[in-house]
Amino acid sequence: MKAALMSLGSKSSLMTMESMRKYFDAVDSVNIKNVEVTLGSKGLSILYDGKPLQKYDCIYAKGSFRYAPLLRSITTAFYDTAYMPIKPNTFTIGHDKLLTHLALQYYKIPMPNTYILSTVSAAKKILGKVKYPIILKFPQGTQGKGVMFADSFAAASSMLDAIETLKQPFLIQEYVETGGSDIRAIVVGDKVVAAMKRKAAGEEKRANIHAGGKGEPIVLDAHTKKIAVNTAKSIGAEICAVDILETAKGPAVIEANISPGLQGITAITKIDIADKIAKYLYEKTKEFSEKGKKTETTKMFTDLGVSAGNGEEQQIVTNLDFRSERILLPKIITKLAKFDEKEDVVIKAKEGKVSLEKY
Ligand SMILES: Nc1ncnc2c1ncn2[C@@H]1O[C@H](COP(=O)(O)OP(=O)(O)O)[C@@H](O)[C@H]1O
Ligand SMILES: [Mg+2]
């Protein structure tokens, strides 16, 4: 199986690629800066270095918010043919804290009270009602750089005036007192594979490692783990980092990061996160391509004229589709057998054999 890691070539991406090479037959590094998307009535085409991008079984795409539209286009183009851990619209949601908070709200995931306003004058009205300190945020900031702390109306009001001159969207958020600490959990599939508690440096309020924060490994309780996994699900990401604040009322999510740095948390937790991601990608790709093969087998028999009604017993070699503990038979079997829902059937089964016959 062949995989592509589409990224900006960060150290974290290189770590992931090296791990992926242990599982996949081949892994290509695709720099998203050299990808070109063409839209037109003939369809969606993706060029890499001027040539059509080849077919992959797995595409793991990541990058910064600037590339969100490009990443969304690429993943849309390959949605049916390659396994991808991040859904096309997740690139838009995950790179925007406003949209992330909307998704969190929709799935009833706890978060600090957050105000979304379109104008500074509307925001100033809110400033008169909230308890201080508060947080002001740019929806597309990362590494703590778009997060501002205001401990009074005067501070918040002057910050809003500065924001207005930048003509940038923003959000206002209740400040949660945690002593400058937060939790970062890495979600892979339906598991938290690693987590750390970060503490901001000195008087700093932002716990980001890039803002000088220090991390230590932490084992999360089942409730916090579930919140992290549900956050990933709410934005449609199978791999992401989730930032959580510990409040008096329990965990509150502040961010989902679909392109998280792995170096810091790997060193702190001593967990080989890149390997966990690679292994997960491989398992899911296998599942994805087997499902595709199954559809193809059915299609092949249809193409070969194995259709209902010629009276002869037909044979299909395929693997079984288990739905929880039930077995779902292929559509072609329903067509061939012509069973009626109202009629009784005799099901005979022993180890390694099942037969079905009209009663
Ligand atoms: N509502 C809040 N209350 C208290 N601290 C916060 C709040 N929001 C963010 N922070 C602090 O700022 C840091 C960065 O915020 P976050 O929303 O994760 O943005 P970024 O994308 O820049 O990491 C967090 O790790 C946390 O330490
Ligand atoms: Mg963060």
Image (cartoon, rainbow, N blue to C red):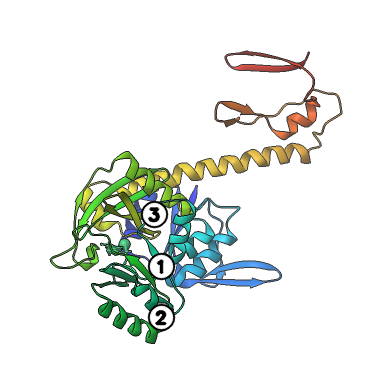
Assign ligand 2 to one image quadrant: bottom left
Mark carried by residue 176: none
Secondary structure of residue under mark 2: helix
Check the image and name the residue furthest to the bottom.
165
Distance Cα–Cα, label 2 vs label 1: 12 Å
Residue for badge 1: 115
Q: Amino acid at mark 1?
A: Tyr
Q: Position of residue 265 (x, y in %)?
A: 25, 54
Residue for badge 2: 120
Q: Is mark 3 within 8 Å of ligand 2?
A: no
Q: Residues within 10 Å of mark 3 (few under 14, many from 20)?
A: many
Is residue 96 visible in the rendered structure shown here?
A: no
Q: Position of residue 152 (x, y in %)?
A: 24, 75
Closer to the camera in the image, 331 or 124: 124
Residue for badge 3: 240
Q: Position of residue 184 (x, y in %)?
A: 29, 54
Is residue 48 visible in the rendered structure shown here?
A: yes
